[in-house]
Image (spheres, rainbow, N blue to C red):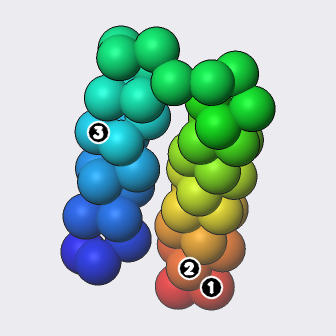
Amino acid sequence: MIRLIAIAVLLVLAFVLVRYGTNAHLQKSVVITVGVGLFLYIASVVIVELLH
């Protein structure tokens, strides 16, 4: 549940930063962070399900 909240917060942060035109480096960092966070969440869910 905490991972879902963290992903939601990162998505909102990414939306706000992209929407209000911050610099390109910061936007790229946020997009990469969101992508990695989502990938790690999906990988952890798949691994947990395979272990059951």
Question: Going from the N terminus, do you reach mark 2 or mark 3 first?
Answer: 3
State the residue in front, 14 or 46.
14
Label 1–label 3 contact, CB within 8 A: no
Report x, y in % for residue 40.
65, 63
At label 3, the amino acid type is Val
At label 2, the amino acid type is Val
Q: Quadrant of residue 7?
A: bottom left
> Label 2's element?
helix
Question: Residue at point 62% right, 85% down?
Answer: 51
Residue of label 1: 51
Question: Going from the N terminus, do you reach mark 1 or mark 3 first?
Answer: 3
Residue of label 2: 48
Q: Quadrant of residue 47?
A: bottom right
Mark 3, residues whose alpha carbon is within 10 Å: few (<14), some, or many (≥20)? few
Residue 49 in view (yes/no): yes
Foreground disc of the pair 1, 3 = 3
Label 2–label 3 contact, CB within 8 A: no
The CA distance from mark 2 to mark 3 is 27 Å
> Label 3's element?
helix
> Label 1's element?
helix
The CA distance from mark 1 to mark 2 is 5 Å
| In the rendered image, the vertical position of residue 33 relative to residue 32, given as above or below | below
The CA distance from mark 1 to mark 3 is 32 Å
Report x, y in % for residue 9.
29, 54
Residue of label 3: 12
| Marker count (numbered) | 3
Mark 2, residues whose alpha carbon is within 10 Å: few (<14), some, or many (≥20)? few
Query: Left or right: 23 with respect to 18?
Result: right
